């Protein structure tokens, strides 16, 4: 895998979701960086320069995902950020994701083809 392939940082406290994302993304030629908490995610974010970020809304704490997004905004993040959510249509009642500057929201359970289609499109726009 080449260093010029997009690097996608994924945060989720569910190891099965992280494993799924790693397998799917690496099979498509993307580079993968994973973290199982917002704190670990911030550490990884500082170590790598992600081209795109996928973050779970509810990790170790209910608002850990939104807290992470706010922190990287303060650090000047320019990478598109997608939120992972299992709360479905209630997401807009839970948080104002437009104010977080999210590129979009993926609903769990993730569908591989939908995920890849959206990521390809967003990464092509960012290139």
Image (spheres, helix red, strand yellow):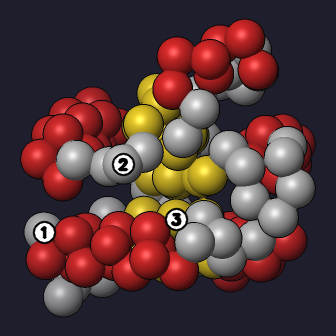
| Sequence-earlier tag: 3 or 2 | 3
Callout 1 environment at 10 Å: few (<14), some (14 to 19), or many (20+)? few
Identify the residue at horizontal 18%, vertical 53% (top origin).
Answer: 112
Secondary structure beneath label 3: strand
| Sequence-earlier tag: 3 or 1 | 3
Callout 2 environment at 10 Å: few (<14), some (14 to 19), or many (20+)? few
Secondary structure beneath label 1: loop
In-image side of 120 versus 3 (left or right): left
Q: Which residue is mark 1?
A: 28
Classify residue 27 by image quadrant: bottom left
Residue 10 image label: 3
Q: Is label 2 or label 1 in front?
A: 2
Residue 72 image label: none
The answer to which of 88 and 103 lies nearer the viewer is 88
Work out how far the residue at label 3 is from the one at label 2, CA to CA, in angstroms: 15 Å
Classify residue 22 by image quadrant: bottom left
The answer to which of 3 and 65 lies nearer the viewer is 65
Q: Is label 3 or label 2 in front?
A: 2
Rendered view: 45 above or below 83: below
Q: Which residue is mark 2?
A: 109
The count of marks equals: 3
Work out how far the residue at label 3 is from the one at label 1, CA to CA, in angstroms: 15 Å
Work out how far the residue at label 2 is from the one at label 1, CA to CA, in angstroms: 19 Å
In-image side of 10 versus 25 (left or right): right
Q: Are marks 3 and 2 in contact (CB under 8 Å)?
A: no
Secondary structure beneath label 2: loop
Rendered view: 112 above or below 12: above
């Amino acid at each position: 895998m080449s260093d010029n392939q997009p690097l996608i940082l994924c945060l989720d406290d569910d190891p099965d979701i992280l494993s799924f994302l790693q397998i799917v993304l690496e099979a498509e030629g993307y580079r993968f960086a994973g973290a199982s908490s917002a704190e670990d995610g911030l550490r990884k974010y500082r170590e790598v320069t992600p081209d795109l970020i996928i973050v779970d809304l509810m990790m170790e704490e209910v608002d850990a995902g939104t807290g992470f997004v706010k922190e990287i905004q303060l650090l000047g993040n320019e990478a598109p950020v997608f939120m992972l959510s299992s709360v479905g249509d209630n997401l807009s009642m839970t948080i104002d994701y437009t104010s977080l500057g999210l590129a979009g929201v993926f609903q769990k359970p993730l569908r591989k083809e939908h995920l890849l289609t959206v990521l390809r499109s967003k990464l092509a726009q960012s290139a």
